[in-house]
Image (cartoon, helix red, strand yellow):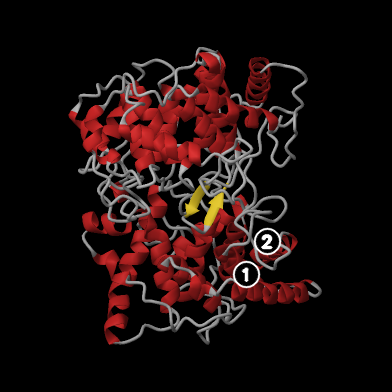
Amino acid sequence: MSLPLNQHPHQHPHDGLDRQARIEGAVAASTGLLLATQLPTGAWTNPRPAAVSGTAGAALALHLAGTGADRALAEGGCAWLLRVRNPDGGWGTLEGFPSDVVATCMAAAALTLVPRPDPGDAAAREAVAGALAWLGAAGGVEAVADRTVRQLCSLVLALAGLGDAGGVSRVPVELVLLPAALRRKVLSYLSPPFVALALLQSRFGAAGPLARGALAAARPAAVRLLGAVQYQEGDVGSYGGDPWLTGLVVTALASTGSVASPGSVALAGSGRSSGSVASPGSVASPGSGTSSGSGTEPDDARLVAAGLDYLRATVQPDGSWCMIHGMETARVEVTGPAFAAAALGTAGFADDPRLARTRTWLADCQQTTPFPLYDCPPGGWTWSGPKGWPNVLDSLAVLEVLLQGDRDAPALRRGLDWLLARQDRRGSWSTFVRNTLVPLDGPCPYITAKALLVLHEAGVPASDPRLVRGLRWLLRRQDRDGGFRALWHRGVVPATVAVLRLLAALGRSRSPVARRALDRLRAAQLPDGSWSTGDRGEPGTVDETARAVLALAACGDGAGAARGADWLLDHQRPDGSWEPGRTCVYIRDHVHYSDFLMAQGLALSALAAVSALPAPSDASDPSDPSGASGASEVSAPVAGAGTGDVR
């Protein structure tokens, strides 16, 4: 049985049932669906819509660097792009999503560079013209505030001859020459896209002798860095388990390096034709620089060949590629299943043998070797099974599930030790690299609040200096409006909720910080009872509403939680599922995506929490000042809050 993906919400009639009966029915339907779709291993397959940027990036790489058979795959990808174009002329991150700059630029470049027989080619030309018109109406690439996103879009368009790379700010490729410890802090997980952009920019010529010298000195180190990333991911050919990023890297290497080409098209900015690997099967062993056959194969060619193999293996039957496919041909994903499992545990299934299988599977996904690129010891998890980039965010999702089982389980103890070892010097937690200087990596209030809650629930006392230091850092991150911000989820709700749930667990739900956060959360509720980004112009989502309900329930606001629960009940579909919201962040302010299993887990957890509350009329009033605790938080400064220092 497969999980549903795109069904229309079903408005359930109340049928005269009281709220508790409706919640019990909804919980039964949700748990029934999740348990029925669980795999024998204890895992789940998380439905993932096809991605425009992933498909466009893969099509570019396969056409520019691949064989004749690969170009047929590229044409199939472009045919899919034409089918999912939005009526306004642009493309969104996923099929049906609102148009955005990144997806539109990627799609336009792929449709320009990948020729198709008429009438497909005529349709592609018309689509590209529409994309450029959409970009112009949106202010053009020049209007993009984020420098890296602006560089990406400009260089991809220039590669296809649709724009000028001359005005693009220089990508300082020489950063790869920094000592490893410093390079980690300034590049973090952005190393692959950083190198790809630097290489793409190089094909248009470095401005000035110093820039050309820096490129000549840094290029070998940049290619070695890409090789190290690919190797440490499990040597499967991908970067981040993502077809888009893999395609971008392969395109950059093939269009600027020493990869032999049978010749296909001339790329913009150069008189030479695109690169291609004649024999993808002769991939060298990691770091050896030599192929399995005779002679020596350039590192560029080895990396390109491995990347092409990954893209061939991950194409979908309709010709598209998924967003964040993972490291295996068959998609293995940890985070969404962890949310589902945690919710099932909350709903009363923690001791069920089926959840025990899930905990065993998650324990088996724990990384057992170091990840030197992040100076990361073994013991953490990533989103894509046992292979990939270890990070705190996904590790926390797994630890929440393991805490529902044997508290002395080796995987749990190792994971908790790993989590403590990943704390920043300032007391916070970042995503990938400790003490990072990359704003998109951290430090993150959402991750820090979740880490502190996991450690508290694992038995680390609130008086522990590491928790005290973390809480002190966290409380100083409150925005002036009372909210908190997350790095990997949009809007004000996720981080504000995470902080409120932490403070409630610590007995501080009536502290001044908690009061301001509760006021902000209540102010963000929409008239229909749901939550969204905090902007009343955005419709509510299951993900954000469920998070808010969890916080209100934890803080004792039964009436507020019940109103949000009513909205969730009204939006459950006939099969027991909910439509996921576009709430997860891939590139802040530009690329958002939905996660089906995460939404199911959040909604089920929220309804289970409301079900466990006393009737709203009996619930204590969280605004009652009597018995307020955590008075020491009054002095927690908020100066500098909202300045972007944690974005």
Q: Residue at x 74, y 23 (%)?
A: 14
Q: Residue furthest front?
A: 625
Seen in the picture, residue 546 relative to 629 is either above or below; the reply is: below
Q: Nearer the viewer, residue 216 or 476?
A: 476
Q: The residue under label 2 is which amino acid type?
A: Gly
Circle 2 residue: 77
Seen in the picture, residue 318 relative to 47 is either above or below; the reply is: below
Q: Residue 111: x percent and y percent?
A: 66, 71
Q: Residue furthest left?
A: 465
Q: Nearer the viewer, residue 620 or 73?
A: 620
Circle 1 residue: 110
Compared across the picture, whether 181 is left or right of 279 comes to: left
For mark 2, give the secondary structure.
helix
Compared across the picture, whether 21 is left or right of 368 comes to: right
Q: Give the mark, 1 or 2, whose residue is nearer the N terminus.
A: 2
Q: Residue at x 66, y 66 (%)?
A: 90
Q: Are marks 1 and 2 in contact (CB under 8 Å)?
A: yes
Compared across the picture, whether 251 is left or right of 436 comes to: right
In this view of the protein, can residue 155 be seen by the observer? no
Mark 1–mark 2 Cα distance, whole angstroms, equals 9 Å
Seen in the picture, residue 333 relative to 18 is either above or below; the reply is: below
Q: The residue under label 1 is which amino acid type?
A: Ala
Q: Residue 513: x percent and y percent?
A: 32, 35
